Image (cartoon, grey):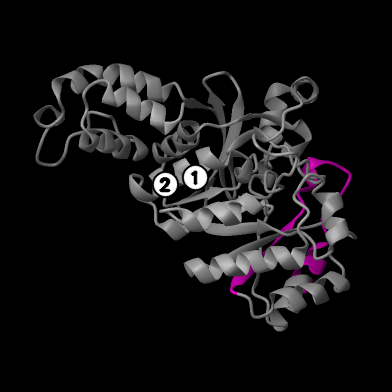
Amino acid sequence: MRHADFDQRLASLDALPVHRGRLMRVWLQGQPLDQGTRRRDSQHFLPLALRNAVPALTAELDGLARVRSEHAGNDGSRLLVELADGQMVESVLLPRDGLCVSTQIGCAVGCRFCMTGKSGLIRQVSSMEILAQVVLARRMRAVKKVVFMGMGEPAHNLENVLEAIDLLGTEGGIGHKNLVFSTVGDPRVFEALPRQRIKPALALSLHTTKAELRAHLLPRAPRIAPEALIELGEQYARDTGYPIQYQWTLLKGVNDGDDELDAIVRLLKGKYGVLNVIPFNSLEGDDYQRPDPERIREIVRNLHSRGVLTKIRNSAGQDVDAGCGQLRARAVGAEQVVELRRTRGARPEGSPGTTHATAGAPT
């Protein structure tokens, strides 16, 4: 269900826009639809037809998603969320009232270091299903920041993601720069985001300064040279005043060499952004390994000393075997994931096969 469908349903009950907006605000806060105010009970301002429809509307919204299991870790709880059709996504309760949400079931980018990418794209997540992840989280604790960096490439579900962002930035009460759109750099993102009423912060999955290596690691990402991708990010930073978050999954012996560090300094020094280095989640397979702890610290010290703001971010859920995509993979079984990929052969809507890699990027 998209928000437009739900809004039309409310309109059919002769609910005025002011009432429809209020119901959306109340729901997005994780509160009952008939929630009153401190001064007035809902029966004093909601029309009778709408009050009578509240139980059915509540059941409809509650049916969008449910928490199938919760996995508490040192860095926050990872939620396995089951949608109405039985498909599952993951969302993560992050420190400092943050939440990472999924925008697709699976992902078409096929990043070689990502568990989610191994399933391929199964289907898109609707705007209301994205919002339902926020509602479930808010029923558990406060949520003041939402990161679109879980399962899926938001650029390949652009209409639904932008609709969810708009509602969270208006009715959901979340500051615009606390809505973070993560992408491998689909050109449609740089065309669409500057035109939005709610302009989110931007996270770009870089992972290497070498175009050929990037094409190998992110096999179905758009063929944009790292230099060009950084310039597109810089333009968006100038337009919004938000720093860009550059994501770099550290792979031992692949993209952690001194040549990469020299190129990072050349490309990012003086830029308005931060480089998040993310040690590879070794639980996702044996094809790659994370660098030794001392090398990771050395990389950060090196870049800091040369003028590049760098932070270490570990993939959430590693301590409970719940890195991005792992909970879903275990729940459906590896064989089913592979079978779905074979039978569906899905590609992002409106895309000839260009895709993203933050589906597996740590949240």
Give the image quarter of residue 2.
Answer: top left
Type of amino acid at the residue the image marks with label 2: Asp
Is residue 311 something one can see in this rendering? no
Is residue 137 something one can see in this rendering? yes
In depth, the one of 107 and 28 nearer the eye is 107
Helix, strand or loop at label 2? It is: helix
Residue under the image location 76 percent in, 64 percent down = 226
* Coordinates of residue 343 in the picture (x, y in percent): 77, 19
Which labelled disc corresponds to residue 162?
1
In depth, the one of 263 and 279 nearer the eye is 263
Residue 274 among those drawn in magenta? yes
Q: Are marks 1 and 2 in contact (CB under 8 Å)?
A: yes
Give the Cα separation between the discs numbered 1 and 2.
6 Å
| Residue span colored magenta | 272-298
Residue under the image location 48 percent in, 66 percent down = 240
> Horizontal placement of 256 versus 305: left or right?
right
Residue 190 in the image: above or below residue 342: below
Residue at image mark 2: 166
Question: How dense is the environment of label 1, judged by Cα within 10 Å: few (below 14), some, or many (20 and up)?
Answer: many
